[in-house]
Image (cartoon, rainbow, N blue to C red):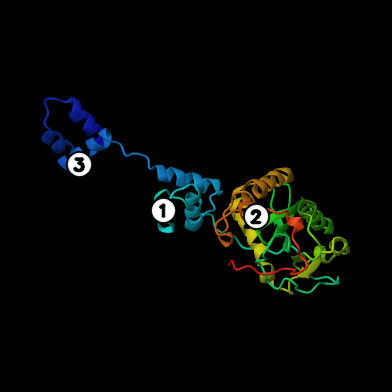
Amino acid sequence: MMQHLVNATTHAKKATVSQWCRVLGVSRSGLYAARQRRLHPKSVCALSVQAKAAFEASGQSYGSRRLSAALKVQGLAVGRQRARTLMRSNGLRARWRRKFMHTTDSRHALPVAANVLARQFNPQAPNRAWVGDITYIRTRSGWLYLAVVLDLFSRRIVGWSMAPSMPAQLVCTALGMAIASRQPLPGLVVHSDRGSQYASQDHTALLARHGLVCSMSRKGNCWDNAVMERFFLNLKMERVWQNDYANHAEATNDIADYIVGFYNATRLHATLGYRSPAQYEQQFPIPCESLNLQKSPIGLSERT
C-alpha cells in the first residue's frame, strides 16, 4: 500500500501530501520514508554475500568459529562475533547431529590387541598413527557400509572402502589403499575398535606383512577412538543427512567427493589451527615414507 501511495503522490498534482495521508491513514513521515527507500534502495552487503558463499561451500556445516576462519583465509578481517552476527542476519544455521549407532560387533572369540595408542591423538609427523572404523550409510536400495583409515597427524583420510556388507575384506581394502598411497615404514600404529573385522586373520595378517602395530580400543570405550567417531559425525552432518541416496552408486560417488573434494582439501579443522588436512601436511616437504618412525612410534605434538 505504501508503494502505491508513493507512486500516487508523484503523479497526482492536484492533491496535497496531507490529503493523501488522511485518505490512506498514514503519516507524512512514513510517506517520505517510503519514497526514500524507493529512490535509494538498500545496497547488498558484499560481506554477507561472501559469508553465504563460504557457508554453502561448507555444506551448511560451519558455525561462527569456522566461518570466521574461512573468511580470514580470503583476507577478510571477520572475528567470531561478527561472523555470528552475519549468520544470524542472513538466516544461516549449521546442521546438527543425530543419535550415534555402533556398527561393528565386538562379541567374538577372536584375539584382540592391547590399546597401544592410548588416546595419543596428536602425533608429531605423518604416518605414525592411523585410526580406522566402519559406519553405515542409508540408501533407498539398502545399507551401504563405509570403512575409513585416518592419519591422526593431519586428520587426513588416507584410505576408504564401501560395500553393501561389512566382511573383513571391507577394512582390508581400506587399509590396503592407505598403505599403497602413503607407503609407511614399519612401526606405524593402526588403531581400531574390537570389531570382528579388525580382529580377523585377514586384517591382522595384512598388518603383520607390512610391519604395522595393531592397537584396539578397550571394551565398550568409544572414546579410545574419538577422532574417528568425530569424522563420521562430520561426514553425516555435512553430507549424508542432507541427501536421500537412490542407490549405492550414488552414495559411493557423493561420499568419495566429500572426502577428496572437501574434507581433505578444504575443510577447516580447529585442531589444525583452522587449516585443512592438505594444508597442514604442507609443513612436511619431505616424503612421508622417508620419516624415521623407529625412534618414536607415536610421539606427541603440542597442538590441542
How dense is the environment of label 3, judged by Cα within 10 Å: few (below 14), some, or many (20 and up)? few
- Label 1: element kind: helix
Quadrant in which residue 30 is drawn: top left
How dense is the environment of label 1, judged by Cα within 10 Å: few (below 14), some, or many (20 and up)? few
Quarter of the image that includes the N terminus: top left
Q: At which x and y percent is residue 149?
A: 73, 58
Q: Are marks 3 and 1 in contact (CB under 8 Å)?
A: no
Q: Three-letter amino acid code at disc 3?
A: Gly
- Label 2: element kind: helix
Q: At which x and y percent is residue 81?
A: 41, 58
Residue located beneath label 3 in the image: 30
Q: Three-letter amino acid code at disc 2?
A: Glu
In this view, the mark in front (2 or 1): 2
Q: Nearer the viewer, residue 275 or 91?
A: 275
Residue located beneath label 2 in the image: 281
Task: Report the disc number at residue 88.
Answer: 1
